[in-house]
Amino acid sequence: MITERASVSLLGTTALLFEAPGELNLGSQQRIWALARETQEWPEVREAVPGMNNLMLTFMRPPRSAAELESLEARLHAAWDAAEALPLEGRVVELPVVYGGEAGPHMADVVSHTGLSVEEIVDLHSTPIYPVYALGSHPGYCYLGGMDPRIATPRRKVPVLSIPGGAVSIGGAQTGVSASAGPSGWNTIGSTSMCFFDPAQDQPAMLQPGDMIRFRVERIVK
């Protein structure tokens, strides 16, 4: 039996990316959280940043030779093999969402792809409690797990130049909420007024890995 192996690649000269093998799921992501916590204590590591089924390490003292890099990769693989799921217990945050209409300009595309009605899509989207897997893309943005596969919809072939902060969208098998205005290739189905990032706060990002989101239907606009 051949076991799929994690991959390690350099990001310039001051960072590397560890990519876990296998499909993305909560158990694997919890092992990424555990690996991040361990590697953050390594003397050469400046910051350990968990992503979606991956971990970026930035260095205070980067590997300076092929031998040093090979040694670091071996340590990473060994740490991953030994890592156990770390169940971070965060807050459950409820987000009021207006679905459809001007707030959800791509709802019709999700309806067309899935064959479901607007009401069915809203019900399937608002039922789960979504764990926050990682932060990324832009400040405060949360990558979420747990979306019902029945409403999975491919990303848009032509990205939208700007969607507003608070846009609730579906991209492939994932859903997320934009923390600020910007371009996106995801399908926006609704909007929330919640603020996800405030640089004036001691902790600028409202949510952290391990927190959970519940979407509450405020209203549906057709």
Image (tube, rainbow, N blue to C red):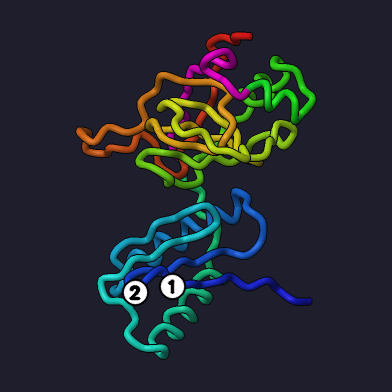
Using residue 134 as the reference point, say whether residue 41 is left or right of it. Answer: left
Q: Residue at x 54, y 21 (%)?
A: 190
Which residue type carries mark 2?
Thr
Above or below — where is 138 with respect to 70?
Answer: above
Q: Quadrant of residue 62?
A: bottom left
The front one of 118 and 154 is 154
Above or below — where is 75 with respect to 159?
Answer: below
Residue beneath disc 2: 13
Q: Quadrant of residue 203?
A: top left
Q: Residue at x 61, y 24 (%)?
A: 106
Residue 103 is a magenta residue: yes
Which residue type carries mark 1?
Leu
Residue 45 is a magenta residue: no
Residue 19, percent across and down? 54, 64
Q: Residue at x 53, y 75 (%)?
A: 77
Above or below — where is 61 with respect to 55?
Answer: below
Residue 11, percent across and down? 41, 68
Residues at discs 1 and 2 in contact (Cβ within 8 Å): yes
> Residue 10: which numbered mark, if any?
1
Q: Which stretch appears magenta?
A: 90-106
Q: Where is the C terminus found, in terms of image quarters?
A: top right
The front one of 124 and 82 is 124
